[in-house]
Amino acid sequence: MKPQHYKAVVIGGGIVGAGIFRDLALHGVETLLIEKKDFSSQTSERSSKMLHGGIRYLENMDFELVFEALHEKNLWLKLAPHLTREVPFYLPVFKDAKRPLWMISLGMFLYDFLSSFENTPHSIKSPQEVLSTIPDLKTNGLSGAGVYYDGIMDDAKITLEVIYDALKEKCAHARNYTEVTTVTKVHGKNIVHCKNLLTNEAYSVTCEQVIYALGPFTDRFLSTVPMYHWQNVLLPSKGSHLWISYKDLPLDYPIVMTTNDDRVIFVIPHGDQILVGTTEVAYNGDYFDVVPSQSEINYLLSALNDYFPKLGLQHHHILGSFAGIRPLVKEDNDAGRGKTSRVHKIFQPLSDTYVIAGGKYTTFRVMGRDITRDICHKYGTSYNQDYTLRPLRQHSVIMPFDWKVPSIEELIQICQTEAPKTFQDLVVRRLSIPNRKIWKLRAPGIDFDQFFLQHLDDLKKYLLISKDEICNFI
């Protein structure tokens, strides 16, 4: 039986909520983490899968943010080498570019400087050197390229492993597929009203402190709780990505494309797949399980074909796509979404209620530190910011950079230790297989349905799974 009263409840099981949950747990604060769907199943698994300082934010003069993000990037490259990789990013420059090569070189030096020179040093490549590495790149007007270093990662697995690490502490509990229907207050205690979405059971827990780490859902939920008198703070921005097979887009290193409308699109190899993104558009629909629009897909394909005209990439080359909503915080000026700062903000509608919004995935560890420090001090606990510098103690069974077809023993181990509740949780986030096309690419010659159906009876002991769910998986 889990307790029904906690010192703190964190609502939102994405990367920011996971980071705060871990920090509180490492300090011995009895904490519950609640997530409406599976942990890391929304924005936190729909990023560009980079740990980066944000080289494009230099133009916005966000030096403090870039400094912090670069140091966090280099920290996580050391703490989680099984989930992260440092790779060179090529930024091709053409003769009609808004930013000539000397300006790119200056920006990359500043980027290295803000990392305290912990980055692998940048370099400048001649057109011949660029084309020897990226032979399919367009040649017309190519002046050369700047090469700088950032990290790539498996975003869903980092979030999950941060949660697993917190759960090593006896004071920590977590519940996925739990909807918070509302929050009320009686005799000074917060009552969090919950509903288990898999069983439809309604129940409540009480707590002394509530932390909302809801990402793009912040305004929509808090505006439904009368006692907060919430005023909207977000400027939601939709970002979409494509997966392309390496055989159709043979690229060994990431490149940074600058579009005609002055947006930045990253093209990043992840083994046998190439990730392409992202867009940045206004969005007012349902924030759960967002999908790219046709116009966004066309936009990304057009940019690819501008940079790689010889490849003739079309819709049938797309292995899959995904989209998420960035929780950008409104600024006082009229900056558009592309220029809006990625700095996070913390709000306190009540003395025992914290709301964190905005920020970057890369800086999740430090974003909620002011919240956890304040809560620790309320309970007379000395706050030690070095606790979160410890390596994560539970690794995923299936690693992103050394992927293999799992055995039944590994599938059972995942079910026992990694908290999946549904078949989709198992396949998409624990096995990193978003759809059948990518399964076929990664597991050639192994029929998807046959593989999982032969293990159906064993998996039923742990998951909500049926033959229809397997056969209807996209």
Image (tube, rainbow, N blue to C red):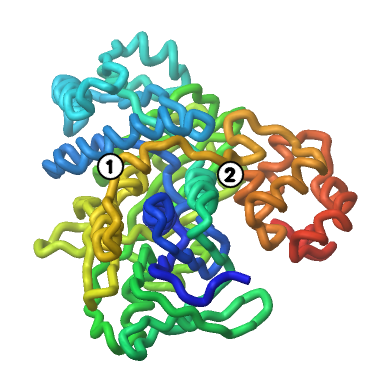
- Determine the image quadrant of residue 446: top right
Nearest the camera: 314 or 421? 421
- Residue located at (87% from left, 48% from top): 450
The span from disc 2 to disc 1 (Cα, nearest Å) is: 22 Å
Viewer-nearest of discs 2 and 1: 2
- Determine the image quadrant of residue 21: bottom left
Number of marks in picture:
2
Q: Which mark is residue 414?
A: none
User: Quick one: SS at disc 1?
Assistant: loop
Q: Is residue 397 above or below residue 372?
A: above
Q: Is residue 306 above or below residue 433?
A: above
Q: Along the horizontal axis of the image, is 322 left or right of 124?
A: right
For label 2, the residue is: 318
- Whole-percent x and y of residue 158? 49, 44
Placement of the C terminus among the 4 image quadrants: bottom right
For label 1, the residue is: 260
User: Quick one: SS at disc 2?
Assistant: strand
Amino acid type shown at disc 2:
Ile
Q: Along the horizontal axis of the image, is 103 left or right of 46?
A: left
- Residue located at (59% from left, 48% from top): 320
